[in-house]
């Protein structure tokens, strides 16, 4: 016990005197969480919190053209530009401005679009009263045409979001125009026609509820997603200082000195594991403080921990154990500092990518979704999401804890085996 | 209580993985207790391999090693308590002070509390380092590091001390302090197993020597008896050159 305590004290002193290592362990992850949360915050917020400036050319000058413009202006997420500073808009100007990237979207409502919708409405009434062979009362070959120009640099997902939003309220306007056309047409055949109405209101209402049967205070947002995700990433980044520590010990002959002293590899590595597990837990606590107190200063939501604090602690402990075990194994197997640093860093980045730290697993292709289960970062992330997003407790994360703990045991055992074989071969 | 030799080595063979030739090819030697035994040889002769096997750092391919009567394969942990090792590298933590390094090493040997503190202070003043105990090792000069490296090997007062090139790269003053201390330590009963390239130093220090080359012991005996025993054997260096030749060894 005295040997283990002496080794822990030694590891602790080495750690606290390594300022660059401390910065890497504590400061860099905090900056990482802050930056990534700020960057990704926009994609978690509602669309109406970000403004998109678009060029709008109304060649229709009728109901569709006017109502689409009103609709776009009412929706708070569009800023509608109908003329440039020095001249009126025309389609060539719209195309040119969007192509140059000055605007991301240009919308042109073609002339006669409202008439085309009305004509269809009139024709429907005729066909309902006189049958399919009813004489044509309007030119139904015409179609309402809306041209949307996109900046080629625009992300596809963003383009689809804009397109969907536009389709939703143009279909409402279309329904309104057709309804008015139907009313007007029917009025000709009724002895006592009712006063014209503007159109049908929606009879469907939507309620959006995050499905959880537990803690209801939690609202999924960028903070709830990003703080655990990047904390896990940071915890696994102890691979850099820890492998460095192991390789320095080997290259300087200290590992040989340790080998000729009483004690065993378990004590030597056990001290490192103890200190770096404590580092991981301190990292985690710092991240929670960051999420609760610092992020709100940047106009981000405050991290909600929920009532399952013990589950959170166990998840953090299991994660840091897995990270430490993996780091010890890489530090033992690698022969040089460069090997360990490059392999360690790249492997953690790959495991993070596979594990859903960068892009959620559900958005990945099927093959990558299936692959994600090999990443310990995924087991950890899933566990944290159970607690921080779904309001789960210890029962819900038992399998995640077990997987991480088994991973720790396997990696540490392998490291001890490799280490004892290497020095005595 | 039976008296065992400090070291008994019989037909020691060591072949490294992937090597064509064995690094040690049937080395046998006996070092009685209380000797200062010099293991001398050109580069790549097998000195460090032999010492590493004796200390338990390496496993022998074949042969037997006994340290103070303990069979090395079965009694590794017992042997660790009675030996001290001073490696050629400065095996100290550069970001720890001398006191912190020595307290850690002492604790690993089971020393603690007042006993440990007193032993550290005693060793530090023995080597003229008492004023520098709280300085980080990385701020030490080469000679000071060598002296702390030696203290780390003798802190627990081992019965057998292994030294691999303990005076390499240091000034005459530091070397003299180390050599004088080793003589004193030996006079108190510690067996010293020492490897070096410095023949003059070995001649001055060792009570017996073995010259090893190409994994085999070529000759062994007492330096004073060997010098002058044959024509050209004027000192240890001349004996060494006659036995091992003048050809450069690149390994």
Image (cartoon, grey):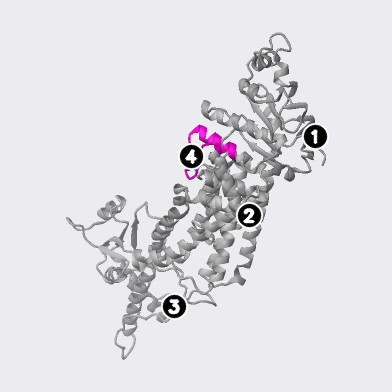
Q: Which residue is mark 2?
A: A2
Which residue is outermost to the top? Answer: B231
- Between marks 4 and 1, how big is the CA–CA gap? 40 Å
Q: Which residue is mark 1?
A: B64
Q: Chain of mark 4?
A: B
**What type of secondary structure mainly makes up the magenta span?**
helix
Q: Secondary structure at mark 3?
A: loop
Residue A88: name its quadrant.
bottom left
- Between marks 1 and 3, how big is the CA–CA gap? 84 Å
Q: Position of residue A146 (x, y in %)?
A: 34, 63
Q: Position of residue A37 (x, y in %)?
A: 42, 60
Q: Secondary structure at mark 2?
A: helix
In the depicted view, which residue is nearer to us: A40 or B91? Answer: B91
Instruction: Say whether marks 3 and 4 touch (CB < 8 Å).
Output: no
Q: Which residue is mark 4?
A: B138
Q: Chain of mark 3?
A: A
Badge 2 crowding class, 10 Å Cα cut-off, few under 14, some 14 to 19, many 20 or more, is some
Badge 3 crowding class, 10 Å Cα cut-off, few under 14, some 14 to 19, many 20 or more, is few
- Between marks 2 and 4, how big is the CA–CA gap? 26 Å
- Between marks 3 and 4, how big is the CA–CA gap? 69 Å
Which residue is outermost to the bottom? Answer: A192
Is A67 on the left or on the right of A19, as rendered? left
**Which of pointers 3 and 4 indicates the residue nearer the eye?**
4
Can residue A177 be spotted in the picture?
yes
Q: Chain of mark 2?
A: A
Q: Residue A350: say if magenta.
A: no
Q: Position of residue B90 (x, y in %)?
A: 56, 36
- Between marks 2 and 3, how big is the CA–CA gap? 65 Å
Q: Secondary structure at mark 4?
A: helix
Q: Which residue is mark 3?
A: A206
Instruction: Say whether marks 4 and 1 touch (CB < 8 Å).
Output: no
């Amino acid at each position: 016990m005295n040997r283990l305590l002496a080794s822990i004290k030694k590891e602790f002193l080495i750690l606290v005197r390594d300022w660059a290592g401390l910065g890497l362990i504590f400061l860099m992850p905090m900056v990482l969480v802050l930056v990534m949360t700020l960057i990704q915050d926009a994609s978690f917020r509602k669309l109406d919190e970000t403004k998109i400036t678009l060029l709008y050319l109304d060649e229709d000058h009728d109901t569709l053209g006017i109502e689409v413009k009103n609709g776009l202006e009412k929706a708070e997420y569009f800023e509608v530009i109908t003329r440039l500073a020095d001249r009126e808009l025309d389609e060539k100007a719209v195309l040119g401005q969007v192509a140059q990237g000055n605007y991301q979207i240009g919308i042109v409502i073609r002339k006669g679009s409202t008439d085309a919708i009305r004509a269809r409405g009139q024709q429907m009434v005729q066909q309902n009263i006189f049958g399919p062979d009813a004489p044509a009362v309007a030119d139904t070959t015409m179609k309402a045409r809306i041209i949307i120009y996109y900046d080629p640099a625009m992300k596809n997902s963003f383009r689809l979001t804009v397109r969907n939003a536009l389709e939703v309220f143009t279909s409402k306007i279309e329904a309104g125009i057709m309804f008015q056309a139907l009313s007007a047409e029917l009025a000709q055949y009724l002895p006592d026609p009712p006063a014209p109405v503007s159109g049908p209101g929606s009879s469907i209402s939507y309620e959006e509820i995050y499905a959880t049967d537990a803690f209801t205070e939690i609202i999924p947002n960028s903070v709830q997603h990003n703080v655990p995700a990047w904390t896990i990433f940071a915890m696994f980044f102890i691979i850099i200082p820890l492998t460095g520590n192991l390789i320095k010990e080997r290259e300087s002959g200290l590992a040989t000195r340790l080998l000729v002293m009483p004690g065993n590899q378990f004590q030597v590595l056990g001290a490192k594991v103890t200190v770096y597990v404590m580092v991981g837990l301190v990292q985690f606590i710092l991240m929670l403080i960051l999420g609760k107190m610092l992020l709100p200063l940047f106009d981000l939501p405050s991290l909600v921990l929920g009532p399952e604090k013990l589950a959170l602690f166990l998840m953090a402990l299991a994660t840091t154990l897995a990270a430490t075990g993996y780091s010890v194994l890489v530090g033992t197997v690698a022969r040089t500092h460069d090997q360990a640093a490059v392999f360690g860093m790249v492997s953690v980045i790959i495991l993070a990518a596979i594990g859903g730290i960068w892009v959620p697993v559900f958005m990945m292709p099927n093959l990558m979704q299936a692959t994600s289960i090999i990443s310990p970062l995924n087991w950890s992330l899933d566990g944290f999401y159970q607690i921080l997003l779904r309001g789960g407790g210890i029962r819900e994360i038992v399998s995640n804890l077990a997987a991480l703990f088994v991973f720790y045991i396997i990696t540490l055992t392998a490291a001890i085996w490799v280490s004892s074989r290497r020095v005595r071969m | 209580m039976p008296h065992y030799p400090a070291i008994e080595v019989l037909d020691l063979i060591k072949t490294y993985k992937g090597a064509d030739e064995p690094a040690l090819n049937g080395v046998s030697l006996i070092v009685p207790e209380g000797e200062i035994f010099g293991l001398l040889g050109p580069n790549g002769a097998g000195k460090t391999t032999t010492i590493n096997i004796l200390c338990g750092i390496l496993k022998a391919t074949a042969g037997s090693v006994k340290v103070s009567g303990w069979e090395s394969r079965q009694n590794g942990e017992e042997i660790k308590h009675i030996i001290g090792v001073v490696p050629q590298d400065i095996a100290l933590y550069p970001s720890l002070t001398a006191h912190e390094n020595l307290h850690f090493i002492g604790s690993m040997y089971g020393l603690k509390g007042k006993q440990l503190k007193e032993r550290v202070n005693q060793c530090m003043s023995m080597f003229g380092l008492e004023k520098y105990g709280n300085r980080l090792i990385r701020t030490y000069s080469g000679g000071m590091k060598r002296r702390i490296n030696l203290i780390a090997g003798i802190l627990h007062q081992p019965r057998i001390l292994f030294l691999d090139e303990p005076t390499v790269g240091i000034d005459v003053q530091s070397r003299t302090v180390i050599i004088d201390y080793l003589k004193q330590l030996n006079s108190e009963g510690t067996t010293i197993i020492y490897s070096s390239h410095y023949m003059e130093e070995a001649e001055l220090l060792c009570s017996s020597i073995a010259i090893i080359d190409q994994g085999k012991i070529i000759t062994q005996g007492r330096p004073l008896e060997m010098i002058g025993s044959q024509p050209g054997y004027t000192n240890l260096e001349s004996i060494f050159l006659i036995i091992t030749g003048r050809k450069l060894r690149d390994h």
